[in-house]
Amino acid sequence: MNRRTFNTKLSQGIAGTALLSGIPLACAMGGAQNKKKLGIALVGLGSYSTYQLAPGLQDAEHCYLAGIVTGTPEKEKVWMEKYGIPKENVYNHENFDSIAKNDSIDIVYVVLPNSMHADFSIRAARAGKHVICEKPMAMNVEECDAIIDACKKSGVKLSVGYRMQSDPYTNEIKRLVSEKPFGKVMYVSSDAGYISRGNPEQWRLDRSLSGGGALMNMGVYSVQSNIYGVGLNPISISAQEFSTRPEYFKDTDESITAQMEFPNGTVGHMFTSHNASANRLFVSFEKGWVELNPCHSYGPISGRTSEGNEIKYPHQSQQKVQMDDFAKHILMGTPNVAPGEMGKRDMIIVEAIYKSIAEGGKRMPLDLGDMGIVKKNI
Ligand code: NAD
């Protein structure tokens, strides 16, 4: 059998298996693996896509901005001209599913209000596209399960837009935690918040679109950094909510504090707010401490240790590094540093925090095991 006949037979074999198992052909054929750079389509062209993701993609090494999906027709021409996007790679919310036929789109990146994450992520998976879903992954754990399930069924990869998981400062914290130059972790504290003074009608303050307030928006960063600041998932959480501007935060949480217990005895504390600026991770070890402040913003991040050493890395777009990491995962099989299970785990914690608050700060046991912990991702 010559090489060409072999390849044809191989393709027919894969195609047959794909059809029998219901996996979309484009995906099962593994077209993406033969490419050098993967095409990303951004769904939702709001501020994050406009000011972070699209610029980040201009410098990316393993992916590029190939397409857009928008519900606002006026944006189509602007984006096509600015980024040289061909008309056939432009979709709206209605014709989005036909993206299945477009081989130049490998990854769909969902950057819409939280209530729309599950719908578009599932539609993207069914179209045979790999998926990046922005944080928080969805409105609740049930929706996270539905996204994970759809991606599994279609045989596509799934990642959550947790840019900090690709950041060198985060990975230095992970190294200090696992290699223990300061001994074991005794206490971790993480804050993430900003003062919201904008339009009170914005979707982030509308529970039906956001699923919650500060906790859903910024609190997931504190949850994440508490976890990588210890290297383990918490075994319990108790939480409190504070409100000082109820006329503005009518529908969503303003500020939340929570305390976590970890299986090795470490104590964790988190604060999140839409009414206070906070941007910090502090990890206290047996023989010293490390602090990042600012910690969760787009950078430059700044870090220091109890020995007076500065933690410093050259600044680059976190979004570029994050999207390149996911493209490398697809192209080269490197670890998926922010898999769907991580987003689901954080949503389990978010739900436990809201439940604890509803029950007067009651301690909520958590049974997470290693869910969402990614090893060897340094
Ligand atoms: P945004 O308000 O700037 O943009 C939202 C986009 O969704 C707009 O293009 C808007 O037209 C569209 N949209 C469709 N239906 C809508 C509706 N019913 N109401 C409002 N907008 C609607 O929001 P954003 O800051 O770009 O956030 C989008 C997603 O990205 C959110 O899930 C957010 O949590 C996430 N995000 C992540 C980061 C990060 O650092 N990873 C940063 C910012 C935002």
Image: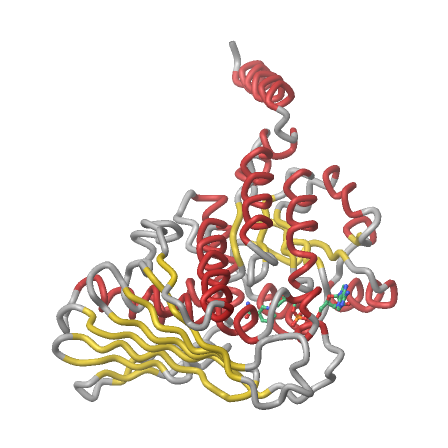
- Of 250 and 35, nearer the camera is 250
Direction top: furthest residue: 1
Q: Residue at x 50, y 50 (%)?
A: 340
Figure quadrant, ligand 1 = bottom right
The reply, left or right, for residue 366 in relation to residue 319 is left
- Of 267 and 37, nearer the camera is 267
For residue 259, what is the image quadrant?
A: bottom left
- Of 38 and 98, nearer the camera is 98
For residue 112, what is the image quadrant?
A: bottom right
Q: Position of residue 42 (x, y in %)?
A: 68, 58
66 relative to 147, above or below? below
Q: Residue at x 21, y 80 (%)?
A: 289
Q: Position of residue 359 (x, y in %)?
A: 47, 67
163 relative to 285, above or below? above
Q: Position of residue 167 (x, y in %)?
A: 41, 68
Q: Residue at x 29, y 70 (%)?
A: 173
